[in-house]
Image (spheres, grey):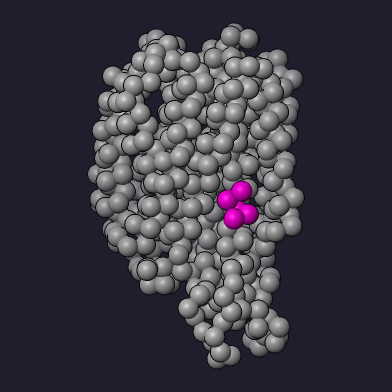
Amino acid sequence: MTQTTESAAARDEDRPAGRTSSRGPSRLRIHRAWIVAVVTFVTIIGGAAFNSLPGLLIDPLHTEFGWSRGEIGLAVSIDMALYGLTAPFAAALMDRFGIRRVVVVALSAVAAGAFASVWMTASWQLMIYWGLLVGLGTGSMALAFSATVTNRWFVARRGLVTGILTAAGASGQLIFLPLCAWIVEEHGWRPASVTVALAALVVVPFVWLLMRDHPADVGLAPYGGAYVEKPAPGRGAAARTVRVLVDAARTGPFWLLAGTFAICGASTNGLIRTHFVPSAHDHGMPITAAASLLAVIGVFDIIGTVFSGWLTDRFDARRLLAVYYALRGVSLLFLPMLMAPAVHPPMVFFIVFYGLDWVATVPPTLALCREHYGEDSAIVFGWVLASHQVGAALVAFLGGVARDVFGSYDMVWYTSGALCATAALMALVIRRGREPSGAADGVG
């Protein structure tokens, strides 16, 4: 279809550096895709602020209300499960209503749940505010959000951008964990919850003013690709999401990817993010020190995830996953021996090592979804992410129950280590898919 002169000129000006058109050399300027990526990064940070809270509040809520760790863990597990189950529908809703609208509503839901929790007096309210509202809100800004932005705005550098956007969650952890830990220690858990609510609300104007749903909205081609018309809004979002699941469920790679990612969630969000701080506190470590260690994981998570994105553009994603899960499993087997009242060098080594591996699994998992499921890959990845969060939810709940029953978390660490070894074997048997479109552009 013929484009206007202004749109064509805009596309030429925003071509990636080094590309030219029939109109002559392109001007050197930042492609709009990178601005959208930055807004997405900041949005995920704001939405991820809540993820810093659960591990910090288990002991304060247990002390103030007398709720068991299993009850509190159940609320966290509801949040994690809804986070995952919402993600594939959120990807379809973004196709129907646009990224901006969905994300603004999601941030508002997170803020509402965090604010409302300040006045809760019963555990069922914890399930509603933390579990339902925050779960639905954060799920709508899950990794399917990153996948949608990456698929629409980038052809070249997809692996790298996926790694950067995945690292946004870790960046939020790095920012909010020490802050919230200090607030909990000095002022109590309620001001920390308000801080999270405000963080979600602050991001809303940036999303509304700077986010765009599709490159064609501003007359551009995606970064590293050719101009394409914006597709008509998809209808029947829920039906499409379920249909994609049914089709994907008929293939073996889907179940292997879902299984490995469920173990990924169990060994990260469900285990370390939820139970590391109370476990370290059981051994006499101050909450602020344990939270600082968890924040350091966030530092190396950023490095590891971005590097994993770079590796995914160059190496077999299946083998990368196998290595990541194997190394994670070995590290978990040693963790019970490292717990102590003070922070020693072996614990620092574990934190650095685990941080590098935390969500390094995301870029190769998303790449495998693209290889096997093409245009439906964002929704398929949403369902794979749902399995990630179901695994996280089970361990968030069962970890709390294990602590109530056995008096320690040791059994949980050992079991998770064995599960990671299983995930490594599962990754190796995933068959190769077709080469994703534009893969060659992403190398170099």
Q: Splitting the image into 4 quarters, where does residue 326 fall?
A: top left
**x, y (%) of residue 5?**
70, 87
Q: Give the percent coordinates (x, y) of residue 170.
A: 50, 41
Q: Residue at x 37, y 32 (%)?
A: 351
Establish if 1 lies above or below 234.
below
Q: Which residues are magenta?
A: 38-42
Tell me the residue at 57%/20% (across/down).
Answer: 57
Residue 63, image x and y in percent?
Answer: 58, 9
Q: Is residue 396 visible?
A: no
The residue that appears at 66% across and 63% down in the rendered structure is 213
Q: On screen, 255 above or below 174?
A: below
| Residue 240 sits above or below residue 135 on the image | below
Q: Is residue 174 visible?
A: yes
Quadrant assignment, res 54? top right
Along the viewing direction, whichever of 320 and 137 lies nearer the viewer: 320
Image check: 388 left or right of 182? Answer: left
Which image quarter is the C terminus in?
A: bottom left
Question: At x 59% / y 22%, what residue is drawn?
Answer: 182
- Give the percent coordinates (x, y) of residue 215: 62, 70
Q: How many marks?
A: 0
Left or right: 29 as drawn, with respect to 284: right
For this view, does 239 lie left or right of residue 430?
right
Predominant SS of the magenta segment: helix
Tell me which corner region of the image, top left, top right, bottom left or bottom right, holds residue 341. top left
Instruction: Give the residue furthest to the bottom.
Output: 22
- Residue 112 relative to residue 137: left or right: right
> In the depicted view, which residue is nearer to us: 165 or 374?
165
Quadrant (top left/top right/bottom left/bottom right) for the N terminus: bottom right
Magenta stretch: includes residue 218: no
Residue 41 colored in magenta in the image: yes
